[in-house]
Amino acid sequence: MKSVALQNTQHIYDLVELCAQKGVRKAVVCPGSRCAPLLIGFGKHPIIKTVSMTDERSAGYVGLGLAQQSGEPVALVCTSGTAAQNFTPAVTEAFYQNVPLIVLTADRPPEWIDQWDGQTIHQKHLYEPHVKGSFVFEEETWNVAEEALELALCGAPGPVHLNIPIREPFYPDGLDDVKFATETRRTQSINNGDIIKEKNWEELQTELNNAGNVLILSGQSEPNAELVGLLNQIDIPIVGDIISNLHGVDNVIKNADLVFKTDGNNLQPNLMITFGRSVISKNLKLYFRKYKPKTHWHIGLGIAGDPFQSLTKTVRVDPEYFFGEWLKREITFSNQNGYHSILAEVQTKVDSVLKSKLNEPDFNYFSAVWKVMEAMPENGVLHLGNSMPVRIANIIGLKTPNVNVWSNRGTSGIDGTVSTAVGHALADPKRTHTLIVGDLAFFYDRNGLWLNHEFPKNLRIVILNDGGGGIFDIIHGSSNQGKLKELFTTPHNRTAELTAKEFGLDYRSTSSMETLEASLGGFEKGILEIFTDMVTNTEFLNSLMNGE
């Protein structure tokens, strides 16, 4: 006969087995008592590996990185109360990046909410509207577990939340008593995906034939060799930020901030085809908001954003399916009016100016990032922090086609940058991962280094330390506030040396091009801190944007 504890918790162990059957291979778990059955279930399961972290905010981002890099759903587990609220930033980022996080929050029974019981808050719908679905999972509502996991993976993936009230007693007498159901109560589901019907292709092809100048623009996208191969066969100008992972596409327009700073409409397309998510380049966004395409299609599942306020059609299929069909139908254009050549010429000029500027003797974080990216190992992975690092890298552009690029651009926050890169490195131990991160973002997320087991040996952290929030020295409004500017730039004298020592990581520092190149030699893991001057950085960017 089962003990009372097992009667209270067997459905939770069966939920762990269901997660395994749905493809979960890793779970990021945070300590607690109310979540004990979840910790025991995931810790004991034979095919799910657990990553244990003390800080739930960092743990959420580690789970995000694990899911992004592995392409598999990842479970997040925590106890009740504010622990669950600390998952919120990572869950929100996952929502906007279509990452399947299975968020499992232990809870007190509902009759104890608002009764002054410890670690008891309102946890139902905690993450809405930034999840695909919220569910309360109990023994009598088993079907919601199947529904939630199916929802996380179908169509455009995304996070789901299962809140799990657990009654005492919930600790088993011994681990040998814990068993996983040999057959779960799951149902079979079939998803055939979406296709474009023939009559719709005829409509699309008619619009294409009558369009004139056509431009393809990609927002943030996961690395996709199949898609890159298809786009290399299409004779249309293609624009891609560094986070679009299209640097393997021949002649891609990659320096959008420098290409689209013109005030003329000669780069305006008649028809623009977009896919992916957000774009980094502010100049590109301003340009297409002013010179809108007459027709704008967005290809893809999930949210169809309209950052240029020009969207006329949404085609809800995967981009690789769309462009694969494009090639099968041998779609060609005869009325581009030299549009491709105009963009290519601008890109060539930008390449020349950029190369000249980066070779100037004054050391700044543009030249530093350039050298770091040039030294990226073959088949490496590049992670970019928000604020300046991702913008710097995007202005410079990446030439190496087989380097994968990731950045938390779903919400563009600085929180969780280190943790997300840690998750990626844990999920992908055979490749070298390089994180370029600003000083404030690094110090904010130092707890991402706080793993309850060995730190990944394949992660290099490059910190751009300009003594504060350098982006606010560049933004026109904040930089003109006199002495109050310090409220934005938050100047400091901190370094990462003691942090590296605390976590047992190798530490290097540099403040010149000569020592930077020497520091990059043999740099395989640990922290490299690059010190630059905020004023010099701002002057360099201004001169680059002004073409000086």
Image (spheres, rainbow, N blue to C red):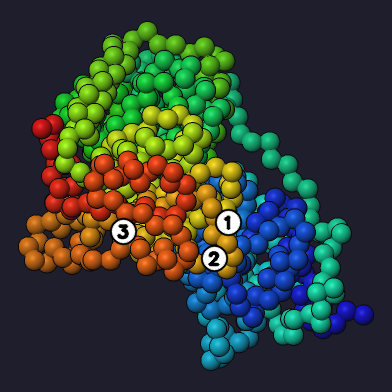
Across and down, in percent, residue 79 comes to: 59, 75
Quarter of the image where one finds residue 548: top left
- Quadrant of the frame with the N terminus: bottom right
The disc label shown at residue 176, or none: none
Q: Nearer the viewer, residue 361 or 429?
A: 361
Across and down, in percent, residue 277 comes to: 42, 42
**Which numbered disc, 2 or 1, marks the residue that appears first in the sequence?**
1
The disc label shown at residue 101, or none: 1
Answer whether residue 46 is visible to the viewer in this image.
yes
For disc 2, the marked residue is: 451
Q: Nearer the viewer, residue 325 or 369?
A: 369
Query: From the viewer's perspective, is 435 left or right of 269?
Result: right
Query: From the viewer's perspective, is 294 left or right of 445?
Result: left
Across and down, in percent, residue 418 comes to: 43, 57
Alpha-carbon neighbours of circle 3 within 10 Å: few (<14), some, or many (≥20)?
many
Residue lying at 15% horizontally and 48% vertically, measured from the top left: 536
Residue furthest right in the image: 1
Q: Is residue 497 above or below residue 291?
A: below
Give me the C-alpha separation between circle 2 and circle 1.
Answer: 19 Å
Instruction: Give the SS element for disc 3.
Output: helix
Residue lying at 63% horizontally and 86% vertically, measured from the top left: 111
Amino acid at pointer 1:
Leu
Amino acid at pointer 2:
Leu
Give me the C-alpha separation between circle 3 and circle 1.
Answer: 28 Å
Q: Is residue 423 above or below residue 493?
A: above
For disc 3, the marked residue is: 439
Alpha-carbon neighbours of circle 2 within 10 Å: few (<14), some, or many (≥20)?
many
Alpha-carbon neighbours of circle 1 within 10 Å: few (<14), some, or many (≥20)?
many
